[in-house]
Image (cartoon, rainbow, N blue to C red):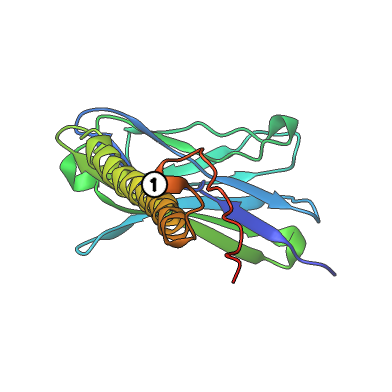
């Protein structure tokens, strides 16, 4: 039998929330083999404590999750298994700094020989959400872009200077070649041909 129970809490491994606000802790599951009386639970732990927040059963894919135990009135099960969402997310309200910690979504599927799986997300409760410091990123990008632009300019300038120097040298060479050649002009005046003198008869 092929076993394939997967549990996901999304792409983010850490989420941030403001003290006193509410946060949705996402969790979805999937099974290629299907499920019956699937057991789920959310647990919380930090360096000092560990506890089960909520647990329940999902009878099948046509029924919503049913909560059996709930440790905290601030927790609401927001999940649904209808339309194959297989969602067992929870909403945690009125957050406190002490809520900072690891939240683990655990699922066990009896239909897959009690195969179980879990996924963990870290919640950080803060006084205020700091804006992602895009200014630093923009400054870094601007500096890198500026450096690259400067290097390109230097390379272009170098090529231009090399080109100008090459042309200047070629012109100097032409001048030297023409000035060192035989001058066929009379009295150094250009354009006038020197008269050929007949050979002197002896």
- 15 sits left or right of 65 in the view: left
Work out whether residue 111 can be spotted: yes
In-image side of 34 versus 48 (left or right): right
Q: Is residue 44 left or right of residue 18?
A: right
Q: What percent of the width, then of the height, locates residue 47? A: 21, 64
Most extreme residue toward the left is: 127
Identify the residue at image location x=28%, y=36%. Answer: 134
Left or right of residue 120: residue 125: left
Residue 121 in picture, x, y percent from top left = 41, 52
Q: Residue at x 40, y 59 (%)?
A: 176
Query: Between 93 and 18, which is closer to the camera in this rendering?
Result: 18
Q: Is residue 162 above or below residue 73?
A: below
Q: Quadrant of the C terminus?
A: bottom right
Q: Secondary structure at mark 1?
A: helix
Please give the residue where the numbered disc 1 appears in the rendered image.
187
* Picture quadrant of residue 69: top left
Q: Quadrant of the N terminus?
A: bottom right
For image coordinates 26% across by 27% down, the residue present is 21
Q: Nearer the viewer, residue 96 or 196?
A: 196
Badge 1, how many Cα within 10 Å: few under 14, some, many 20+? few
Residue found at the far right of this picture: 1
Of residue 191 and residue 199, the one placed in the foreground of this image is 199
Image: 54 above or below 63: below
Q: Residue at x 53, y 44 (%)?
A: 27
Q: Is residue 180 above or below residue 39?
A: below
Count of numbered tags = 1
The reply to whether residue 52 is in sight is no
């Amino acid at each position: 039998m092929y076993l394939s129970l997967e549990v996901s809490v999304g792409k983010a491994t850490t989420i941030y929330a403001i003290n006193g606000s509410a946060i949705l802790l996402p969790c979805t599951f999937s099974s290629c083999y299907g499920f019956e009386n699937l057991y789920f639970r959310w647990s919380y732990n930090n360096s000092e404590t560990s506890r089960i927040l909520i647990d329940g059963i999902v009878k099948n894919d046509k029924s919503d999750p049913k909560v059996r135990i709930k440790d905290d009135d601030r927790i609401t099960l927001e999940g649904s298994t209808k339309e194959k969402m297989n969602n067992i997310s929870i909403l945690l309200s009125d957050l406190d700094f002490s809520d900072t910690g690891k939240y683990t979504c655990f699922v066990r599927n009896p239909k897959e020989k009690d195969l179980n799986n879990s996924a963990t997300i870290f919640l950080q409760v803060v006084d205020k959400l700091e804006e992602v410091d895009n200014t630093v990123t923009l400054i870094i990008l601007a500096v890198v872009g500026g450096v690259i632009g400067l290097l390109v300019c230097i390379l272009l300038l170098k090529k231009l200077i090399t080109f100008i120097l090459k042309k200047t040298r070629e012109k100097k060479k032409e001048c030297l070649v023409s000035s060192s050649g035989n001058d066929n002009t009379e009295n150094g005046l250009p354009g006038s041909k020197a008269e050929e003198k007949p050979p002197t008869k002896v």
